[in-house]
Image: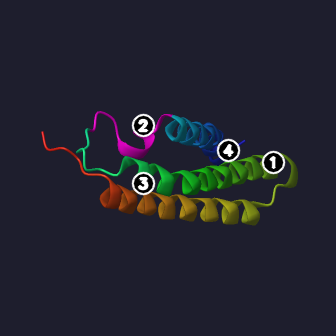
Amino acid sequence: MNNFNLFDIFLIPFGIYIIYSVQKMKRTRVLASVFSGRNVEYESESDIDGFIDYVSGKSVIMALIIIAGSLWNLLNTLIFQNVRLSIAVSAVSLTIIIVYVCMLGRAQKKYLIIKNR
């Protein structure tokens, strides 16, 4: 087991938590802090339903890819031991996370209006 495995072990619960948060957010129609930040208040003009609809599917896909990539890296380390493949999967996972975070930021700017304190 190496440092990459420790990172993968942390990413698997994170992916599961993202899926849980999306399902809870869709059911309650209340923003989860993982998508919007803690203790943030929004103007009444914010399109929270639009934000939830826009982000939910993309978040589940991102979480599933992260979980699959992390599981693959763990299995690769324990069974296959192909370093190049492990690096490639990690690079793809990191790219997906970066694209997802950029998409989340654009969605926040488009749908949510933060109250001035």
Q: Residue at x 75, y 46 (%)?
A: 74
How was this image coloured? rainbow
Residue with the mark numbered 1: 75
Mark pair 2, 4: CA separation: 34 Å
Q: Nearer the viewer, mark 2 or mark 4?
A: 2
Query: Which of the two labelled residues, at mark 2 and mark 1, occupies the earlier sequence position?
Result: 2
Q: Residue at x 35, y 41 (%)?
A: 37
Q: Element at badge 2?
A: loop
The 10 Å Cα crowd at callout 2, few under 14, some 14 to 19, many 20 or more, is few
Residue with the mark numbered 2: 30
Q: Tag 4: residue type?
A: Asn
Q: Which residues are magenta?
A: 28-40
User: In the shown orientation, is residue 31 left or right of residue 5?
Assistant: left
The front one of 84 and 16 is 16
Q: Residue 115 location, x and y as percent?
A: 19, 44
Mark pair 1, 3: CA separation: 38 Å
Residue with the mark numbered 4: 5
**Number of numbered tags placed on the structure image:** 4
Q: Tag 3: residue type?
A: Gly
Mark pair 4, 3: CA separation: 37 Å
Q: Nearer the viewer, mark 4 or mark 3?
A: 3
Residue with the mark numbered 3: 50
Check whether the beta carbons of the residues at disc 2 and disc 4 lie within 8 A of each other. Answer: no
Q: What kind of secondary structure does the magenta stretch mostly adopt?
A: loop
Q: Residue 114 location, x and y as percent?
A: 23, 47
